[in-house]
Image (tube, helix red, strand yellow):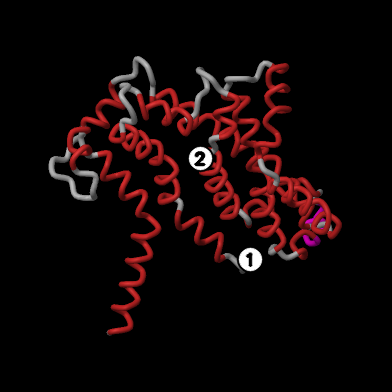
Amino acid sequence: MFVNALRWIVFAVAAIAMNFPIVVTLVTSFKSARELSVNPGLWINQPTLENYLRVLTQTDRFNIYSYLWNSTVASLIGTGLAILLAFPAAYAIARSEAGKRTLLPIVVNLRAVPLIIFAIPLYMMYQWLGLLDTRLGLGLILTVVNTPLALVILVNAISDVPLELDEAARVDGANSWRIMISIIRPVVRPALVTTFIFGFITAWNEFLFGLMLTTNKAVPMTVGASFFFAASGGGVQWGTASAVMMLGALPPVFLGLLMYRQISGSMAAGAVKG
């Protein structure tokens, strides 16, 4: 009994510590500017929805709906294309010793390079191609950001699939493409879902390229949220800024909670249905 109680206390303390910034932001979003000036703590004397109403209704200067839509479209492009590119590559790598030893480390290590290094050449290339301030342009660079993560997840998943399945399919006359689509894909479906979720969250939270490659029409939520900090002038509007950040965090949080079982199932997967 004592051990269980101690375990729950430790879990509660860890959960509060890890989510403390989120709790502070949530509490601040329900405080008026007047209350924030005299009560910066976690207690709310007079809860209000005025910050959320201001963000959702006053769209003349900064349109949160546009930012949310831009992030959604760019994240879907960046995640979907990354999976389409990474899945065949992951199959080839998983079934090739050379791919595991050489190609995969090279691709993954590219993701370890600071993204700011690519800022100037990417901006010049996008300017030449006419992709600046477009959802497609933002989605394409998010594809590059997501591809290494997708490769790692899918290579590990495909490597767990017995090679005997491929050999049996080849005996029946199936080519590599048919094996990958009809046999491998259904088996690693949980890994594909996990890749989509992690990729979407990574793309949604990307700030650097959103700031660098967009100015007006394709501004994502991460960049657009920063516009609300001083939307009314006179310093930082903490209540409004907190409301925007909470609204911007809802889509990836909701997706993660909705697909939690798929993620945990993929992480725990070790057996293959035969």
| Amino acid type, callout 2 | Asn
Vertical position of residue 45 compared to residue 120: above or below: below
As drawn, the residue found furthest toward the left would be: 46
Q: Position of residue 171 (x, y in %)?
A: 83, 58
- Direction from residue 117 to residue 29 in the image, left or right: left
Question: Principal SS element in the magenta part?
Answer: helix
The residue sitting at 50% across, 18% down in the picture is 216
Q: Position of residue 48 (x, y in %)?
A: 18, 36
Quadrant that contains the C terminus: bottom right
- Give the mark, 1 or 2, whose residue is nearer the N terminus: 2
Image quadrant of residue 206?
top right
Where does label 2 land, which residue?
Answer: 205
- Residues packed near mark 2 inside 10 Å, few (<14), some (14 to 19) or many (20 plus): some
Q: Nearer the viewer, residue 216 or 116?
A: 116
Contact (Cβ within 8 Å) of mark 1 with mark 2: no
The residue sitting at 28% across, 84% down in the picture is 2
The residue sitting at 37% across, 60% down in the picture is 17
Where does label 1 land, which residue?
Answer: 272
Vertical position of residue 198 compared to residue 242: above or below: below
Q: Position of residue 41 (x, y in %)?
A: 23, 48
- Direction from residue 105 to residue 19 in the image, left or right: left
- Direction from residue 191 to residue 253 in the image, left or right: left
- Direction from residue 75 to residue 47 in the image, left or right: left
The magenta stretch is 167-173
